[in-house]
Every structure is written in C-alpha cells, then in structure tokens.
Image (cartoon, rainbow, N blue to C red):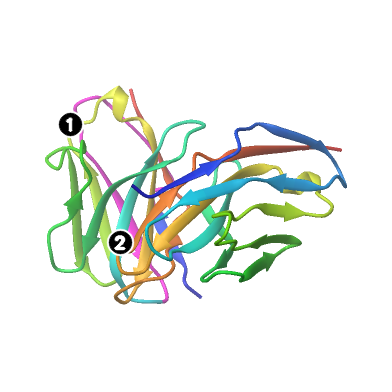
Amino acid sequence: GAVVSQHPSWVICKSGTSVKIECRSLDFQATTMFWYRQFPKQSLMLMATSNEGSKATYEQGVEKDKFLINHASLTLSTLTVTSAHPEDSSFYICSAGEGQGVDEQYFGPGTRLTVT
Amino acid sequence: GDSVTQMEGPVTLSEEAFLTINCTYTATGYPSLFWYVQYPGEGLQLLLKATKADDKGSNKGFEATYRKETTSFHLEKGSVQVSDSAVYFCALLYSSASKIIFGSGTRLSIRP
C-alpha cells in the first residue's frame, strides 16, 4: 500500500514553454502533498506544501507564480513550471501524507525535467 | 532551528564490510526519525523509521536506534552488498507540522 506515482518520469522541453507534472496517491487519500526539488548530488529542498482544496504554502525563495501547484482532489496534485528556463532543469519529487498530522510521507519516483 | 547532520560521503566499502553512517539531529521537541534510500535515477524509498526514544528501526539488514541522550540515529548494517550502493538520507518529521527535514545525504558505494 501507500503508493505514489508521478507522471511523466522525465520530460524535455524548450525554454519559454510550460510543463505540468502530476503526482497521484494510488491507494490512499492524500490530505497533504509536498513538492521537492533535488539538484544533482544534493539533498531535497522542499518547495511547497499543498492541502486539498486550498492554496499551496510555498517555502521562502520559491516563486509561486513560476511554480504553480494545484491540489484539486485527495489523490492528485500538479506542479506546473511556467516559462521554463535551463536553470529550472532538476529532479522534482512529490510526496504525500495520509490524513492530518501525518507521521510519514510516501514519495513518488520523481520527474527529471530538462529545459533546453 | 531544527536540523539534521549526516557524515559526508562518499563512503566506499568492500562487499561484506560493516557499515555505519552517522546521523545527529537538533530538535526542540520529539520528532520521528527516518532513513530514506535513493537508488540511482529513482525517488526516495523509506528504509526504516523510529517514532520515539530507544525505538529501533530495522529493514533489509539495516538498523538504527533513536538515541535521545546523544540526539543520534546512526544507520548500521553488518554485511553490505553491492546492491546497497545508493544515497542514504537521514530525516526528521514532526507529525504536527508534517514537514520533513532532510540531512544532506551520504553516497555509499560498495565494491565487489
């Protein structure tokens, strides 16, 4: 149980275009979902926390107009990278927690974004 | 603020060697502690966890004990295999905040 999927697993896009990444909880309802960014050989950096039906909470330094997060249902959250640039190339990972006061998060396999 | 400190890598060992990856934390309360593993090109997988002091988490031959007195959660394995080569992340989580704080990760390479 507790499986989280991401789609696509990798994507290449041209500079200036937008890319949408989906995160789904397959066998549980995810009240809270998290989006992380990971640079090569570095740790995960939390970008934002989203709760179903409400606006996402962004970490300091993360541009909310550039990284649009939507958590429209208890099983789906999306991250849209708008007007992507090469510096946005990274590994994006989502995680999901079940219920309130989660004591564990379940991670998706990640999406590798390359902007050319 | 709360933080997690891991030993820097990379760590290179021969197969069947004993492994220790040190992890210490700074926390104002009583978080749950985790070890996650990331294999090349993949996302994070939960390896083991402990939710209170003196708890021992274990999985796949790996163990870690929640030591409140030394604020540590060191990862150990008695005999490593080539397939254990990966990046290991120590982390803490407060259930009330639902926000995970990760260490910087330790890359482990096992030689045949």
In the structure shown, which secondary structural element does the residue marked by tag 2 occupy? strand
Q: Which residue is drawn at 85% across and 44% down?
A: B17
Q: From this viewpoint, is residue A113 visible? A: no
Residue B10 image position (x, y, % from top left): 66, 31
Question: Residue A21: within the magenta?
Answer: yes
Of residues A29 and B16, the one drawn nearer to the viewer in this rendering: B16
Of residues B13 and B111, the one drawn nearer to the viewer in this rendering: B13
Disc number for residue A33? 2
Examine the rendered structure and indicate whether residue A110 appears above or below residue B99. above
Q: In this view, does A12 lie to the left or right of B41?
A: left
Q: From this viewpoint, is residue B13 visible? A: yes
Q: Do labels 2 and 1 share a chain?
A: yes
The chain holding disc 1 is A
The chain holding disc 2 is A
Question: Residue A95: within the magenta?
Answer: no
Q: What stretch is highlighted in magenta?
A: A7-27
Q: Which residue is drawn at 21% across and 62% down?
A: A71
What amino acid is at disc 2?
Met
Q: Which residue is drawn at 56% across and 65% down?
A: B49
Of residues B112 and B91, the one drawn nearer to the viewer in this rendering: B91
Q: Which of marks 2 and 1 is in front?
A: 2
Examine the rendered structure and indicate whether residue B28 appears above or below residue A29. above
Reading the image, the residue beneath label 1 is A83
The quarter of the rendered structure image containing the C terminus of chain B is top right
What amino acid is at disc 1?
Ser
Disc number for residue A27? none
In the structure shown, which secondary structural element does the residue marked by tag 1 occupy? loop
- How far apart marks 2 and 1 lie (CA) works out to 23 Å
Q: Is residue B56 left or right of residue B80?
A: left
Which of the 4 image quadrants contains residue B36? Answer: bottom right
Q: In this view, does B85 lie to the left or right of A33?
A: right
